[in-house]
Amino acid sequence: MLYKSLNLQSPDVHFKKALTDGLASDKGLYFPKKIEPLPTSFFEQIEDLDDDYICFKAIEQFIGDEIPEEILKQIVKETINFEFPIIPISSSIYSLELFHGPTLAFKDVGARFMSRCLAYFNREQPSQKNTILVATSGDTGGAVANGFLGVSGVNVVILYPQNKVSDIQERQLTTLGQNIKAVEVIGTFDDCQAMVKKAFLDEELQNLNLTSANSINVARWLPQMFYYFLTYKKLKKENKPLIFSVPSGNFGNSCAGIVAKKLGLPILHIIAATNSNDTIPNYLEKGNFDVKPTIPTLSNAMDVSNPSNFVRIQALYDNDIHQLKAEFSSCSYNDEETVEGMKELFEQFKYVSEPHGAIGYLGLKNYLSNDSSSIGAFLATAHPVKFLDTVEKNLNIELEIPSSIQSILTLKKEKYTVKTYEELKKFLNS
Ligand SMILES: *Cc1c(COP(=O)(O)O)cnc(C)c1O
C-alpha cells in the first residue's frame, strides 16, 4: 500500500517507511492513496466471522504484501488479545469499553500493533536499531512503553513532565525496565514536546534511528478501526442504524472510525465529542478555524486545541465540508457538564465512568435526542481508576484498584531527570 503526504510535497512511500518516518519530510501526515471498500457480503456475514479474521480483513490492504499474511494475522491477534465489552446503558445507548488492555487505555491497541510491525521490519535488518522517542502528558507513554516492552532492536525513551502526571501514570512508565527508559523533564509537557522535536532534527542523533510513536503514525492510527468492526458485529442483531460517539483530542480515534465507514462498515454517523478545547465544533458550526490556547480540563488526555488528525478527516471527505457534515459532527462539553454526565451515568444507570467517557456519553445522548430510531455506542477510552480522584470525589465512591495496577504500586520508580536539551542528548548518546 502506498501512502501520500497530505502536504503533497514528499514522494509516496510504502507502509514500512510511513511507519518508521512518522511524519513525511514535508511535515505532512501520511494518508493511504486508496481505500478499497470490503465486499457487502463481508458485512452481511460478519456475525459468523471470528474477531481476528475481521480485524485482519480490515487492516490487510493498508499493509499490502509488506508483511506476510500469516505474520500479519498473528500481529492482529496479539493486538486485540483483550476484551472489548459493550455494556448496555439504556435501551439505545451502549458503552464500548476500550480500557481492558495492559495499561487500561484504548491507546494500547495502536501501540501494540505498531510495536509488532516495527519488530517485524527490524527482524529483516537485525543490525538496525530504532529508538522510539515520545513525549507524554499521561496516557500515551504508558501504552507505548508497554507495547514495546521486550521488542528486540527497539529502545524506547519516554519524556514526561515532572510532577504533572499522576502517580499511577508515572509508575506505568518507570517500573518496566528492560528496553524502556523514562526521562523526567523539569518543565511542562510542551517542554517535553519541544525536546522531542529538536532531537528529530538533530544531525548528531541520526545514528539512533529516531522514530515517533504518537497518534499521527499510521501504524497507531489505523488499527483503531478494529473495535468499530467488533462493535458492529455484536450490535448487528439490533437491526438499527448505528452511531458512534468518540471522546476526542487529536481526533485519531474518530478518524479511524471514518476509515471503517469508508471500508463499508454500516455506521450512520460519527460524533467527535470534545472538552472545552472546541476548535473543531466551532469550525463546523461557524466555518472559521480558530486555534485558541489550550485549556486544562478534567479530561486532560483531550486537552488539544489544534487536533493533528483533522486534516485526515477532511481528506477522507475530499475536503468537502458538506459531505463531511452529513456523516460527522462535533460537540463540546465543559468540566461542569462533564461531571454532570458522570453523575447521571452513575445515578440513573449505575455505571461508573471517568471524564473522557462521560463526554462521549453526553455527545451521544444529545444526538439521539433528535433521532429515536438509531442506537449508539460511546467509546469509554480510559479506566475510571486512571482518573481516581475525579471519579471518587464526584461520585462519592471508592474504586477498587485492578490487579494490573496493584502489582506496580510497590515497584521502584527508575527514571533519569533532565532540565535541558543538552542533558537529554547526553543521555540519548550514552
Ligand atoms: C488519547 C485519549 C483520547 C483522545 O483520543 P484522540 O485519538 O487523540 O482523539 C481520549 N481519551 C483518552 C483517555 C485518551 O487517552
Image: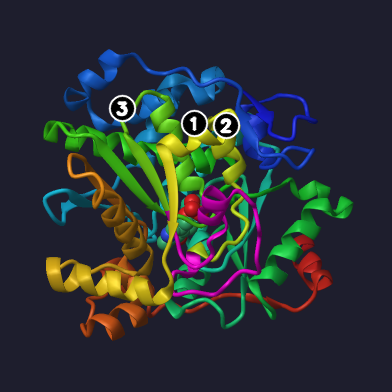
Nearest the eye: 123 or 90 = 90
* Of the image marks 2 and 3, the number of the one nearer the N terminus: 3
User: What's under tag 3, amino acid-wise?
Assistant: Ile
* Picture residue at 81% right of the left edge, 68% below the top: 426
| Mark 1 residue CB less than 8 A from any atom of ligand 1 | no
Residue 212: x %, y % from top left: 65, 49
* Picture residue at 54% right of the left edge, 38% below the top: 313
Residue 283: x %, y % from top left: 57, 51
Mark 2 or 3, closer to the camera: 2
Q: CA distance from mark 3 to mark 1?
A: 28 Å
* Residue ranking furthest to the front: 286
Q: Secondary structure at mark 2?
A: loop
Residue at numbered disc 1:
323
User: What's under tag 2, amino acid-wise?
Assistant: Asp
Query: In the picture provided, is 370 more to the left or to the right than 285?
Result: left
The colour scheme used here is rainbow
| Mark 2 residue CB less than 8 A from any atom of ligand 1 | no
Residue at numbered disc 3:
54
Residue 326: x %, y % from top left: 42, 35
Q: CA distance from mark 2 to mark 3?
A: 30 Å
Residue at numbered disc 2:
320
* Picture residue at 35% right of the left edge, 39% below the top: 269
Is residue 295 located in the magenta-colored stretch of the structure?
A: yes
User: What's under tag 1, amino acid-wise?
Assistant: Gln
Q: Secondary structure at mark 3?
A: helix
Q: Look at the image and give the residue range highlighted in magenta.
A: 273-301
* Residue ranking furthest to the right: 203
